[in-house]
Amino acid sequence: MPIDQETGQITGTKDKDYDLLWFAEASLSNALRMEVYSQDAERAGDTELAEFFRRAQGESRKGAEQAKALLARRLS
């Protein structure tokens, strides 16, 4: 079976559930990365760019929180 057609037989997790778990992790990881990027911009004196990365960080946090809430409902 090609990996692009995996539906849980290999991982033991249905694709849709895996996708939701991946999204939560990717959102949290992105929030951490945006912290680094905003600090880089601040050190360079670029307030506009730092604020842009802070807004992006907020959106990533929001996505992670929504994914975690959805996971909690589905796992209970």
Image (spheres, rainbow, N blue to C red):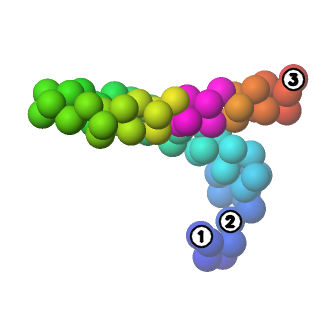
Residue 62 is a magenta residue:
yes
Could you say which disc has been placed on residue 70 in the image? none
- Identity of the residue furthest to the left in this view: 44
Q: For the residues labelled 1 and 2, say whether their Cβ atoms are less than 8 Å apart.
A: yes
Residue at x 51% of width, y 42% of height: 26
* Position of the C terminus by quadrant: top right
- Is any part of residue 34 visible from this angle? no
Q: Which residue is mark 3?
A: 76
* Position of the N terminus by quadrant: bottom right
- Is any part of residue 42 visible from this angle? yes
Q: Which residue is mark 1?
A: 3
Q: Earlier in the sequence, mark 3 or mark 1?
A: 1
| Type of amino acid at the residue the image marks with label 1 | Ile
| Type of amino acid at the residue the image marks with label 2 | Glu
| Type of amino acid at the residue the image marks with label 3 | Ser
Alpha carbons under labels 1 and 2: distance apart: 5 Å
Residue at x 52% of width, y 30% of height: 58
Q: How many marks?
A: 3
- Type of secondary structure dominating the magenta stretch: helix
Q: Which residue is mark 2?
A: 6
- Identity of the residue furthest to the bottom in this view: 2
